[in-house]
């Protein structure tokens, strides 16, 4: 029997930032509380218009496996619908009922009471920026002085080094070619236009001040760019940076980080054949398998620290 589709499962942590861009602790169990809240909202209150695209999110409960999970999807424009091949080889336009439309989803499965979710998406499915916008929209009334962000789960040392940085002198990024991706969700500014013009090509960008130091404003803006790329690693094939951190003697340390090297992700097979879509149950089984591996990794790291 043919194998299913192998995809990477990515893990994200929900983070709250205050008006000064300082990370604030979130009480454990955020995703459980959000699931209950989302389930009680009307359909129109779960919709999001983001950068010209329509999104909607759902809180579901599955019986097998018995889990609560989130289904967040992006409507695919009718002009971008694929054709279908009928029996006999003739091609025809895809036909849906008037009240139906194609959507690109992401499935998100919480990890126990931790503020972490495992996620897997279709090739054109939502990226973190749109999910963040949706979360902030739903929690708008209680986020007057802050906002939520989704941070990739990485090596803890790497995350702390990024948070402690005051500037950057170099960033080296390569995007993944993805004809079905939404350029508006990818790298910003002029790169978005290039991705739109050449969606099947990868893009390489390196900004560097060499051995010199940029001005404080340039260094801070470049660090902000690095942090935004850090939160959108699914769209990158390479992401390296040289960051500036204060040293003990009052100077600055140049800290070189390869962000993808320590990214937490797991390869899972979804479904039983690449010719057929995986069922929601099969997708959830794949996410649950990834979370079991993550739990085993945590236990192994805790054991190593005790030795």
Image (tube, rainbow, N blue to C red):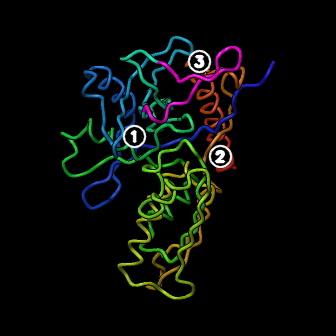
How many residues crowd mark 2 within 10 Å: few (<14), some (14–19), many (20+)?
few
Residue located at (29% from left, 25% from top): 37
Extreme residue toward the bottom, this view? 212
Task: Tell me which corner region of the image, top left, top right, bottom left or bottom right, holds residue 246.
Answer: bottom left
Residue corresponding to mark 2? 301
Position of residue 166 relative to residue 8, above or below, is: below
- The structure residue drawn at horizontal position 38% and vertical position 27%, both measured from the top left corner, is 32
Q: Is residue 17 magenta?
A: no
Q: CA distance from mark 3 to mark 2?
A: 33 Å
According to the picture, the residue beneath numbered tag 3 turns out to be: 279
Q: Position of residue 213 (x, y in %)?
A: 48, 86
- In percent of width and height, residue 193 lies at 45, 59
Residue 8 position within the rendered picture, expressed as x and y whole percent measured from the top left: 64, 39
User: Which residue shows up at 18% across the image and 48% down it?
Assistant: 144
Pointer 1 residue:
131
Q: Nearer the viewer, mark 3 or mark 2?
A: 3
Q: Quadrant of residue 143?
A: top left
SS at mark 2? helix
Q: Is residue 211 left or right of residue 217?
A: right
Secondary structure of the residue carrying tag 3 is: loop
Magenta-tinted stretch = 78-95
Of the numbered discs 1 and 3, the one sitting upstream in the chain is 1
């Amino acid at each position: 029997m043919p194998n299913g589709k192998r995809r990477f499962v990515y893990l994200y942590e929900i983070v709250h930032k205050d008006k000064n861009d300082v990370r604030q602790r979130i009480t454990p169990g955020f995703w459980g509380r959000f699931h209950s809240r989302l389930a009680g909202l009307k359909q129109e209150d779960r919709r999001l218009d983001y950068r010209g695209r329509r999104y909607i999110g759902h809180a579901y409960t599955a019986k097998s496996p018995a889990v609560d999970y989130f289904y967040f999807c992006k409507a695919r424009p009718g002009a971008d619908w694929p054709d279908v091949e009928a029996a006999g080889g003739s091609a025809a336009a895809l036909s849906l009922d008037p009240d139906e439309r194609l959507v690109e989803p992401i499935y998100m499965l919480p990890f126990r009471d931790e503020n972490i979710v495992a996620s897997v998406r279709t090739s054109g499915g939502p990226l973190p920026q749109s999910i963040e916008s949706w979360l902030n929209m739903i929690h708008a009334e209680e986020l007057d002085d802050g906002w939520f962000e989704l941070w990739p789960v990485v090596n803890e040392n790497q995350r702390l080094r990024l948070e402690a940085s005051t500037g950057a002198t170099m960033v080296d990024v390569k995007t993944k070619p993805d004809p079905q991706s939404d350029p508006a969700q990818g790298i910003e500014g002029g790169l978005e236009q290039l991705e739109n013009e050449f969606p099947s090509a990868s893009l390489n960008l390196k900004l560097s001040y060499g051995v010199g130091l940029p001005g404080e404003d340039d260094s801070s803006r470049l660090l902000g760019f690095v942090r935004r790329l850090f939160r959108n690693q699914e769209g990158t094939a390479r992401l390296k940076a040289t960051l500036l951190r204060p040293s003990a003697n009052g100077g600055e340390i140049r800290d070189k980080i390869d962000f993808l090297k320590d990214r937490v992700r797991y390869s899972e097979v979804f479904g039983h054949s690449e010719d057929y879509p995986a069922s929601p149950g099969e997708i959830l089984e794949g996410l649950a398998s990834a979370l079991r591996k993550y739990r085993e990794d945590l236990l192994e790291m805790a054991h190593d620290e005790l030795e």
